[in-house]
């Protein structure tokens, strides 16, 4: 059973929503938006540390990474 990990959940109804794609870079999960070329959000699955670049408060970004090797899923939303 996968355990969802919610990160920085701030639902913004009515705001634009962009679905991000997630890739893994070592200990980091990297979320990129196809519509915002300069947007990048990182989540360290080992420490829980997060960082974001060029995150707009008007756009609700979300993405999910399924880490089969950890038997967990990671969810990103801001
Ligand atoms: Zn975007």
Image (tube, rainbow, N blue to C red):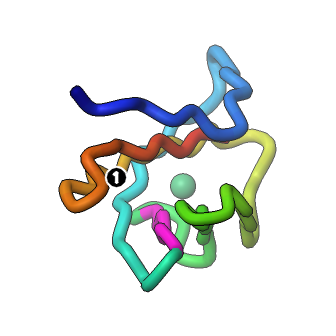
Residue, x 19% and y 55% (percent of image)? 68
Residue, x 60% and y 71% (percent of image)? 40
Residue 68 vs residue 64, the one in the foreground: 68
Q: Quadrant of the N terminus?
A: top left
Numbered circles on residues, count: 1
Residue 43 vs residue 10, the one in the foreground: 43
Q: Quadrant of the C terminus?
A: top right
Q: Secondary structure at mark 1?
A: strand
Residue, x 42% and y 31% (percent of image)? 4
- Magenta stretch, residue numbers: 28-33
Residue identified by numbered label 1: 65
Question: Is the residue at mark 1 in contact range of ligand 1, meaning its CB lies under 8 Å from it?
Answer: no
Query: From what the image shows, is residue 52 above or below residue 70?
Result: below
Residue 72 appears in which quarter of the rendering? Answer: top left
Residue 47 % position (x, y): 67, 63
Furthest residue toward right = 57
Residue 13 vs residue 22, the one in the foreground: 22
- Ligand 1 is located in which of the four quadrants? bottom right
Residue 65 % position (x, y): 34, 52
Q: Is 57 included in the stretch rendered in magenta? A: no
Residue 36 vs residue 31, the one in the foreground: 31
Furthest residue toward top = 13
Residue, x 43% and y 83% (percent of image)? 25
73 displayed left or right of 49: left
Furthest residue toward bottom = 26
Residue 60 appears in which quarter of the rendering? Answer: top right
51 displayed left or right of 62: right
Magenta-highlighted stretch: main secondary structure? strand
Residue 26 % position (x, y): 44, 84
């Amino acid at each position: 059973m996968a355990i969802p990990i919610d990160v920085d959940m701030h639902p913004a109804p009515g705001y634009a929503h962009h679905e991000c794609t997630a890739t893994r870079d070592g200990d980091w999960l990297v979320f990129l938006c196809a519509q915002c070329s300069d947007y990048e959000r990182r989540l360290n699955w080992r420490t829980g540390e997060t960082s974001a670049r060029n995150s707009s408060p008007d756009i609700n970004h979300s993405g999910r990474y399924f880490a089969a090797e950890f038997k967990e899923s990671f969810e990103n939303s801001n």
